[in-house]
Amino acid sequence: MRHASITGIGAYLPDRVVTNDDLSQLVDTSDEWIASRTGIRERRIVAEGQATSDMAAAAGRGALADAGLQPEDIDFLVVGTGSPDHIMPSTAAITQDLLGLRCGAVDVMAACTSFILALQQGTAMIESGRADRVLVIGADALTRHIDFTDRRTCVLFGDGAGAVVLEASDEPGVLGIDTGSDGSGAGVLVIPAGGAAMPCTPERVAAGEHYLKMSGGEVFKFAVRIIPEATKRALELSGLTVDDLTLLVPHQANQRILDAVAPRLGIESERVFSNVALLGNTSAGSIPLALHDLYTDHHLHRGDVLALVGFGAGLTWGAAVVRWMKEPKE
């Protein structure tokens, strides 16, 4: 049976660092207020003229290099994002050109769950025999959609991108995947204006309807419920239990969410990875960026069982159980 395994990983973060103290110069907030409620201390912000595709391409180059592959070796590209360069063309098409790939390319847009759904698509293509190597990227520049006078949202988000190469393997790498959506919660996390339902007009821009709006309490309740549920379902699909889990690698939205998940899942807090303090919520980029941190810091070993879990606007969720097949980084 054909399986998909992660053979390369890359990441990109913008150079500009914005601390909580920096934000306190823009809105009525403080480092203590932000850190106590979110666990975030700083985040990265894209440079002027820099787009989601630029970050995606940089992360993709790193993943190709780590896998020892050339652009012509890739059979398909999937880019997960909630902040595409344009409504059309796709960010994947632009990223493909930047990378010099010679393959099909498509966007997956499911906000912070985008990377897991992109990983699912890449895995399915390999398992079905339609591709041997798929480049999967999660990238977001959500700060372009944030009102920096709104302290409820501007303190949360940062920009960045991560990428993995999936290759066909005789050994199981990507195991069970559980995904879902509850469209009744579509209004909980939304950028109202800019699409076909509500095109941008001068009046809507003046009203700030092109900025992200979020009901934080509803997102929190959803996340602490769905992360354990989806993780257990994905483990069951993999023929595993929570006891087999080496690490939970969740979407990095808020440290309070991560702290609440461990007891609900029945694992120690040390088995829940977090880098939200330094990066904030990088949306579709957060899970592959977390994987890259674990890999480059020598925390991943061949045979480790990881649960990658995303959740976000839609409302959507996705959990993928992965057996890590790469040797530790030298």
Image (spheres, grey):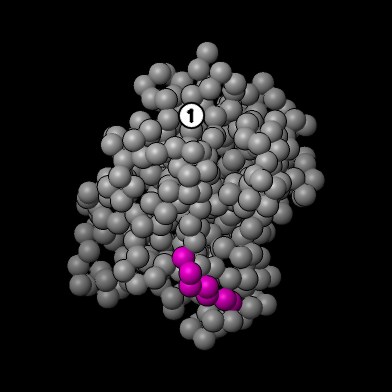
Whether residue 305 appears in this view of the structure is no
Foreground of the two, 128 or 179: 128
Task: Looking at this view, name the residue that lies furthest to the top.
Answer: 1
Which quadrant would residue 55 be assigned to in this image? Answer: bottom left
Whether residue 75 appears in this view of the structure is yes
Q: Amino acid at mark 1?
A: Glu
Mark 1 neighbour density, 10 Å: few (under 14) some (14–19) many (20 or more): many
Residue 250, compared with residue 160, is above or below; it is above
Location of residue 102 in the rendering, given as x and y in whole percent from the top left corner = 28, 36
Task: Looking at this view, name the residue that lies furthest to the bottom.
Answer: 25
Location of residue 115 in the rendering, given as x and y in whole percent from the top left corner = 47, 43
Q: Is residue 35 magenta?
A: no
Q: Residue at x 72, y 28 (%)?
A: 241
- Left or right of residue 262, residue 326 in this image: left
Residue designated by label 1: 167
Q: Residue at x 31, y 65 (%)?
A: 210
Q: Secondary structure at mark 1?
A: strand
Foreground of the two, 68 or 79: 68
Location of residue 287 in the rendering, given as x and y in whole percent from the top left corner = 55, 48
Location of residue 124 in the rendering, given as x and y in whole percent from the top left corner = 44, 25
- Left or right of residue 30, residue 136 in this image: left
Magenta span of residues: 14-20
Q: Residue at x 50, y 17 (%)?
A: 2
- Left or right of residue 140, residue 7 in this image: right
